[in-house]
Image: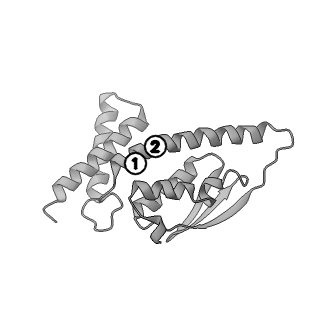
Amino acid sequence: MKSSFPKQFIANTLALFSVWLVLSGKYDILHVILGFMVSCGVGWLNTGFPHSPFQDFPWARVVLYGPWLFLRVVESSLHLTKLILNPSLPIEPRLITYRSHLKHRGAIVLLGNSVTLTPGTITVEINDNEFLVHAIDEAAGNDLTSGRMERKIARVFQEDRNQQ
């Protein structure tokens, strides 16, 4: 194991435990200890592997990406609500194949998860940098097909999309 293993293990464990605390909503001693133990186990398994997407992960910039994604989720929810409440149900489901230019594995994972979190779209499959996404209509998949979401994520990972 490398000499940076303890530092990386602690960083992974704390990041995973923080996410667990935010998402679980249970703060009694049993759940907190169980969450910490699971975070330690997953942190241990994901530490030291040279291609882990968590290594060199820009956590601070991802936090800044969160508000933009939240607004997109709200806007997409309103759009989807409008579609569902329309008596004629004007949906046009489609499968979209999208080729991403992102290089960092963490960026690819973030793009796939961002698409799935946005109502009206689901990432069905990712092969290398090719995404297969189901969209309920053309507008739902617009953030992906226009490249808008990828550009935001490229900025998070400081990738210059123009050179790709």
Q: Amino acid at mark 1?
A: Val
Counting from the top left corner in percent of width and height, residue 125 is at 57, 64
- What residue is disc 2 on? 66
Q: How many marks?
A: 2
Counting from the top left corner in percent of width and height, residue 131 is at 57, 65
In which quadrant will I find the N terminus? bottom left
Q: Residue at x 39, y 36 (%)?
A: 22
| Of residues 133 and 17, the one drawn nearer to the viewer in this rendering | 133
Q: Amino acid at mark 2?
A: Gly
- What residue is disc 1 on? 62
Asked where in the image residue 156 lies, by quadrant, the reply is bottom left
Q: Residues within 10 Å of mark 1 (few under 14, many from 20)?
A: some
Q: Which mark is residue 15?
A: none
Q: Residue at x 67, y 37 (%)?
A: 78
Q: Residues within 10 Å of mark 2 (few under 14, many from 20)?
A: few
Counting from the top left corner in percent of width and height, residue 145 is at 63, 60
Does 30 sit left or right of 24 as displayed?
left
Above-or-below relation of 31 to 11: above
Q: Secondary structure at mark 1?
A: helix
The answer to whether one can see residue 153 in this image is yes
Above-or-below relation of 146 to 69: below
Asked where in the image residue 20 lies, by quadrant, the reply is top left
Q: Secondary structure at mark 2?
A: helix
| Of residues 159 and 96, the one drawn nearer to the viewer in this rendering | 159
Circles 1 and 2: CB atoms closer than 8 Å: yes
Counting from the top left corner in percent of width and height, residue 53 is at 36, 61
The answer to whether one can see residue 40 in this image is no
Above-or-below relation of 42 to 21: below
